[in-house]
Structure formats: structure tokens, C-alpha cells
Amino acid sequence: MRYGKLLALSLMVTASALLFVSCASAPDNAGTTATSTVTPPPTQTLTVAPRPQKIVDMMTARGEQDQAKPTLRIVSPGKDATIAGATVSVKLDLGGDLKGYLPHKDPATGKGNHVHVILDNQPYEAYYELGQPFELRNVVAGKHTLRVFPSRPWHESFKNDGAFQLVAFTVKGGGDASKPTTTNSGQTMAKNNSSPVTTPPREGKDVASSTAGEVDPTKPLLTYSRPKGEYKGEDSDPIMIDFWLSNAKLQGDGGEFRVRYIVDDNEPKFLDKWEPIWLSGWLAGKHTVRLELLDKDGRPVENGGYNTTSREITIVK
């Protein structure tokens, strides 16, 4: 009986030892399925947001300026003018019901009322001091279009009658096509034949060569304004989409046209009222924004190539 108990105890010890050796020699992942976790890249989902509170507060502080109806007249260059040489002087006459509206940059903030000046279909340059010279330098030979309209400090355009002006002119002699067109203050207005941009425009770095042709000022025309350039910090979300519309009414305003906007080749969205919107949800990095004017059948409206315009913007968080 005693021998039987000893034999049973011996067998138990042996079995335990074998089990220990087996567990110690087995790989850590024996009997398990290898898995790996891959974090998918974040997805950008843009939504229409309310007008930012800081802009609402600015509008309140400005008083009746936002109800102003400023008008512009292009004094120079003249309509269908022919200009010898590569320098074009831009002179504007401001009028209308101003209610305190006056283009001027605040030295403390670097912001203020201004005029958006667009050469051909390039990004605009802000013109703050209308009493100071504004020149386009190294303008290449050929026919060009100049567009101007007044803007608020946060670059929202005034949309009253007479605010927008367009003039076509021709340059003979012209500048060096291997170099960009700039302002007299050195800001880049346009690239010429893939010329390098050594000095970016004040509002960003999104200047690209224009492929647009001649514009018919009597036909529907969409002028892209915002967004453009680089956005940092609190200015990077939400971001405003704004444009100027000539000779056309959108469906929500009693017309037959629509504006389609596409961000990064994602699903197209539509605007049926002529007013700015703010989009929230931007991720850091480069993005492309395209605005298109569509007719009642949903087809792009052609006018020199200007009614479909893309801009690259950069978001810095």
C-alpha cells in the first residue's frame, strides 16, 4: 500500500517536471494567432460652420461700415488700352455710400479694409493704401484682364452694384517671361511660363501659371477670391469660401445658376446663394479648393476659362 502511494507520487512529480520543461521550451506565441494593429490615416470631414465669433465681434465694433456700398472705378489702365513696356500702373477711384469704409492697413494688426486686385486669373493681391502707387511690373506681352473689388479686413467681399470692376488691356513690348510679374512692393502677382516664384504673395504661396483666355464682360463670370495661401492657428478652422459673381443669379437668389465647390477631389458640394460660407474640419497639410459656375443644366459655364478655378492652400495646425 505504501509502495503504491510512493509510485503515484513519483509519477505526479515526473509529469509536473515534463509539463514545466514543455512550457519553458515552447515559443511565447505558440498556440496564438499573430495580429498587428495599423492605425488608419485620419479622414477629413468638412462641415459648414457659423460665422466665427471673432468676426461677428469685429463686425459689431465696425458699426455701419459693413452696410456700406463702396463702388470702384478703374482709372488706369483704361479699357482696351495698349501699354508700351512691362510696367502697368493701377489707379482706382473709390466712391459710393462708404459709411466710414476706407481701405487702410492698421499698423498694429496688419489688417484693414482693402481692395482685391486680380491679374488675369491669378490669386489676388490686397491693395490697402489707394493713395499710394500700385504697379504691376514685368507684365508679359499680350492681352490681360484686371479685376478689382472692395473687401473687409477678413477678406469678405462687398457685393453691391458697382463694387466690382473689370478691364481688359494689351501690353506691347512686355516683360521677361522667365520671371514672375510682381507689384512695386515685390509681391508676386503671376507666374509666366513656369517662372519661379522667389517672393510669395502677401496672402500666401499659391500663385500658379494662368491658362485662362479672354473674358467676355457681358457673360456670367465667377471670380474666385477665398480661400488662398496659408492658414495658421485659430485662422485655420473654420475657413471662408467667398467669390464675386457677375451677370448671373444663383438659384437661391431667384436665378438659374449654381456654384459647385470641390475640396481635394472629394464629393462636390453646391452653393445656391451668393454669400460666403465657412468650412470646419480641416486637417493639416496642403489642400486644393475648386470653384465652378454651373448653368441650369449643371454644366460648367465657359468664359475664358475663368469660371472654373482651383487654388492650393496650406493648413498649419
Image (cartoon, rainbow, N blue to C red):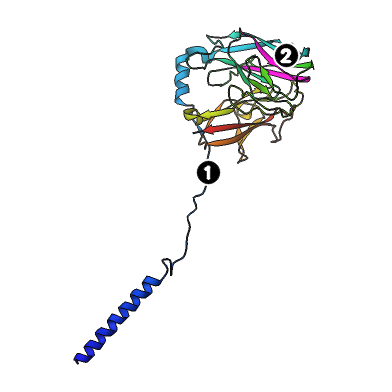
Task: Depth check: give the residue in front, 20 or 106.
Answer: 20
User: Which residues are the magenta region?
Assistant: 132-149
Say what amino acid the circle numbered 2 marks: Thr
Neighbourhood count class around disc 2 (C-alpha, 10 Å): few under 14, some 14–19, many 20 upward: many
Q: Which element carries disc 1, helix, strand or loop? A: loop
On the image, the x and y values in percent for residue 103 come to: 56, 12
Query: Circle 2 sits on which residue?
Result: 87
Query: Circle 1 sits on which residue?
Result: 43
Q: Is residue 227 visible?
A: no
Task: Depth check: give the residue in front, 298 or 166.
Answer: 166
Q: Is residue 100 visible?
A: yes
Measured along the vertical axis of the image, is residue 260 above or below residue 10? Answer: above
Task: Report if residue 143 lies within the magenta region.
Answer: yes
Q: Nearer the viewer, mark 2 or mark 1?
A: 2
Neighbourhood count class around disc 1 (C-alpha, 10 Å): few under 14, some 14–19, many 20 upward: few
Q: Image point 23% across, 90% down: which residue?
A: 4
The quarter of the picture where the N terminus appears is bottom left
Magenta: main secondary structure: strand
The quadrant where residue 254 appears: top right
On the image, the x and y values in percent for residue 176 come to: 75, 21
Say what amino acid the circle numbered 1 marks: Thr
Q: Which element carries disc 2, helix, strand or loop? A: loop
Specify which label sits upstream in the sequence, 2 or 1.
1
Q: Image point 61% across, 9% down: which residue?
A: 130
Task: Depth check: give the residue in front, 309 or 39.
Answer: 39
Task: Report if residue 92 lies within the magenta region.
Answer: no
The quadrant where residue 179 appears: top right
Q: Along the horizontal axis of the image, is 297 left or right of 264?
A: right
